[in-house]
Amino acid sequence: MSLAFERLRRLIGSLAGISLGPDKLYMAQSRLEPIMRAHGCRGLSELMRLIERREDEALLQRVVDALTNNETSFFRDRVPFQRLKRDWLPELMARRAETRRLRIWSAACSTGQEPYSIAMALAEMGEALAGWSVEILATDVSETALTTARRGVYSQFEAQRGLSIGRLLAHFDQKDGLWRIRDELRANIAFRKLNLLDDFSGEAPFDIVFCRNVLIYFEPAVKSRVLTRLRDIAADDGCLVLGAAETIGARIGGLTPASDAAWLLLPRPSPRPLAAIGA
């Protein structure tokens, strides 16, 4: 392994928690090639020297963006969105009947398909949510991904991944071969840059936290720290939803794995705990 790649691994791990294995050198070079070309760097060593001067924070952000996996789709894995409408929200609404307020966080939201899927699921509940205040916060470490998310404009290929014709017609406008999320849906979501490695303890508690398919890229120690912070930011009777392939690895105090370890829930003080089943 080259010294330059080892320096890159340490840097991206400290900035974004991403674990670049020794076998990811070719992938990293391929993704960084346009950046190296734009800055006149003849190789990874020259790019690292440029980065380490810390004279260009925009360059550092472009490197993080290039190495962040933004693979996503609308209603990805389907099951969590089905459970959101059928089980989790009705249970939480019964407990929040007095305040009539819910907060949902889509962490590592990438280019926005997950928070928009959540917003569509909420819209499809119709009158059941009339008079309720539902806040959706969507965050990501990548400015490039967030720019796409805020615009809410997707290609035909992106739109058809996970969306039925009915949902496209109900929630999007089409123009010049692109599909744009309607303003009333986009208005329900606040997009913000947030690094899961940073301290987000100042946030108000969330009833539901989606943090799916990102922790698998973190080193075990980093994953444990992030899970602990996610546990602490969730309401006492809230739930934390992970990707179907993700597990906690080691027990985190206050987190209980579901029977198939695909979902993690916080312990419930109520006599009727919110159950979650993985896909």
Image: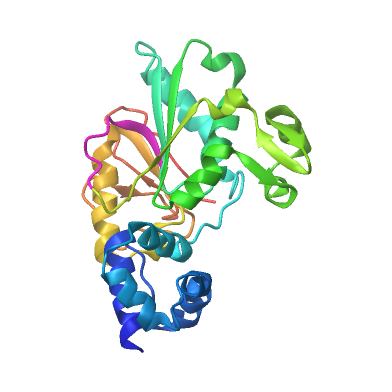
266 and 133: which one is in front? 133
> Image height check: is 89 above or below 129?
below
Residue 182 relative to residue 216: left or right = right
Furthest residue toward front? 40
Q: In which quarter of the image is residue 46?
A: bottom left
Residue 67 relative to residue 172: left or right = left
Tell me if residue 201 is in the magenta stretch. Answer: yes
Residue 203 place in picture, x, y as percent: 27, 34
Report whether residue 250 is seen.
no
Q: Give the range drawn in magenta.
A: 199-210
Residue 77 place in picture, x, y as percent: 58, 50
Report whether residue 45 is seen.
yes
**Way the structure is coloured:** rainbow
275 and 89: which one is in front? 89
Residue 216 place in picture, x, y as percent: 41, 63
109 and 153: which one is in front? 153
Q: Residue at x 47, y 60 (%)?
A: 245
- Number of callouts: 0
Q: Residue at x 53, y 48 (%)?
A: 111
Quadrant of image for the N terminus: bottom left
> Image height check: is 7 above or below 67?
below
177 and 276: which one is in front? 177
Q: Residue at x 60, y 25 (%)?
A: 183
> Image height check: is 233 above or below 28?
above
Q: Which residue is drawn at 39% across and 51% down?
A: 141
Residue 105 place in picture, x, y as percent: 40, 37
Furthest residue toward bottom? 1
Tell me if residue 54 is in the magenta stretch. Answer: no
